[in-house]
């Protein structure tokens, strides 16, 4: 499987398993199954309330922990430094692991002290609790402040990104600063299967529309994707997207699709920078 490796200590398989909103035994079963199929990247978060289920899977699988990349995240109401550290320690207990491979701020807030929050985040890396650190759902101005003004060694950014939501500005920034960009909701909550242009490209390549949507993301430099898939069939087809090869005509067709269809926009979301 292809990896993203960067100077911030990140070594992350480009395709991962998203686990939201799976919980309990269903989540444990899905993660164990994914690891058996060949996944080596699992994405979870305190806010998903399934870290214990993922931890059970990490204990149950025969795949050694050091071969599995695990990303987790701290929720937006725990960004005060002491609370952030306590959240990470709870995550590790639930995950039954001494460390996470990547630890992210899940959402920014308007009242957080960005510098002290980032200092606490970097402190987790310095203590060995996180191999690498990053942020999620940061619009470009906030990301610039974090990386260029404060100088935080962020290894990754996780944002909604798919064939109908462009992230050109964030992706250019990530590449310039040697960061990974992980796409969540990479299948636009399965709406990609209903987009005629994607269906047509899939027919041309004799694959599924979801595989086209993932292949488009995964062929991009610095981009990873974490589609949620509970069943073996979907997990297997998502893995197979790594072998799909698009041509220039396909890319042009996808480029012509609308790029402003944001699906994840909770009340606490930041002001998005949607010029991309």
Image (tube, rainbow, N blue to C red):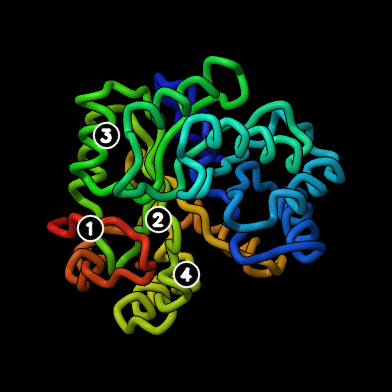
Residue 47: x and y in percent read 57, 55
Residue 140: x and y in percent read 21, 44
For marks 3 and 1, give the CA distance. 23 Å
Disc 4 secondary structure class: helix
- Binning the other alpha carbons within 10 Å of mark 3 as few (below 14), some (14 to 19) or many (20 upward) gives some
Quadrant, the N terminus: top right
- Tag 3 near tag 2, CB within 8 Å: no
Disc 3 secondary structure class: helix
Which image quadrant is residue 135 in? Answer: top left
- Tag 3 near tag 4, CB within 8 Å: no
Q: Which residue is mark 2?
A: 245
Q: Earlier in the sequence, mark 1 or mark 2?
A: 2
Q: Earlier in the sequence, mark 3 or mark 1?
A: 3
Direction from residue 204 to residue 208 in the image, left or right: right
Residue drawn at (41%, 70%) of the image: 188
Select label 1 or label 2 by which is in front.
Answer: 1
- Tag 2 near tag 4, CB within 8 Å: no
Residue drawn at (23%, 58%) of the image: 272
For marks 3 and 2, give the CA distance. 22 Å
Residue 247: x and y in percent read 29, 58
Select label 3 or label 2 by which is in front.
Answer: 3
Quadrant, the C terminus: bottom left
Which image quadrant is residue 19 in? Answer: bottom right
Q: Which mark is residue 101?
A: none
Residue drawn at (73%, 54%) of the image: 31
Of residues 140 and 227, the one nearer the viewer is: 140
Q: Which mark is residue 271?
A: 1
Residue drawn at (78%, 62%) of the image: 24
Q: Which residue is mark 4?
A: 210
Q: Earlier in the sequence, mark 3 or mark 4?
A: 3
């Amino acid at each position: 499987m292809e990896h993203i490796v960067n100077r911030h200590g990140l070594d992350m398989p480009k395709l991962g398993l998203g686990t939201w909103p799976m919980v309990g035994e269903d989540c444990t079963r899905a993660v164990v199954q994914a690891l058996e199929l060949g996944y080596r990247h699992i994405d979870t978060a305190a806010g998903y309330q399934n870290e214990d289920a993922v931890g059970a899977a990490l204990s149950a699988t025969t795949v050694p922990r050091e071969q599995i990349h695990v990303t987790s995240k701290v929720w937006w109401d725990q960004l005060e430094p002491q609370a952030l550290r306590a959240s990470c320690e709870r995550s590790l207990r639930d995950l039954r692991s001494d460390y996470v491979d990547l630890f992210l701020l899940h959402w920014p807030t308007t009242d957080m002290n960005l510098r002290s929050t980032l200092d606490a985040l970097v402190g987790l890396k310095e203590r060995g609790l996180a191999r690498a650190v990053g942020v999620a759902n940061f619009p470009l101005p906030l990301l610039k402040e974090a990386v260029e003004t404060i100088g935080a060694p962020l290894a990754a950014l996780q944002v909604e990104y798919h064939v109908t939501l462009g992230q050109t500005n964030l992706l250019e920034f990530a590449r310039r600063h040697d960061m990974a960009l992980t796409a969540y909701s990479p299948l636009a909550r399965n709406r990609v299967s209903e987009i005629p242009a994607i269906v047509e490209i899939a027919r041309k390549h004799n694959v599924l529309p979801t595989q086209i949507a993932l292949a488009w993301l995964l062929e991009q430099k610095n981009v990873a994707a974490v589609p949620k898939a509970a069943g073996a069939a979907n997990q297997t087809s998502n893995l197979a997207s790594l072998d799909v090869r698009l041509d220039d005509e396909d890319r042009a067709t996808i480029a012509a699709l609308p790029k402003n269809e944001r699906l994840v926009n909770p009340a606490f979301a930041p002001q998005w920078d949607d010029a991309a």
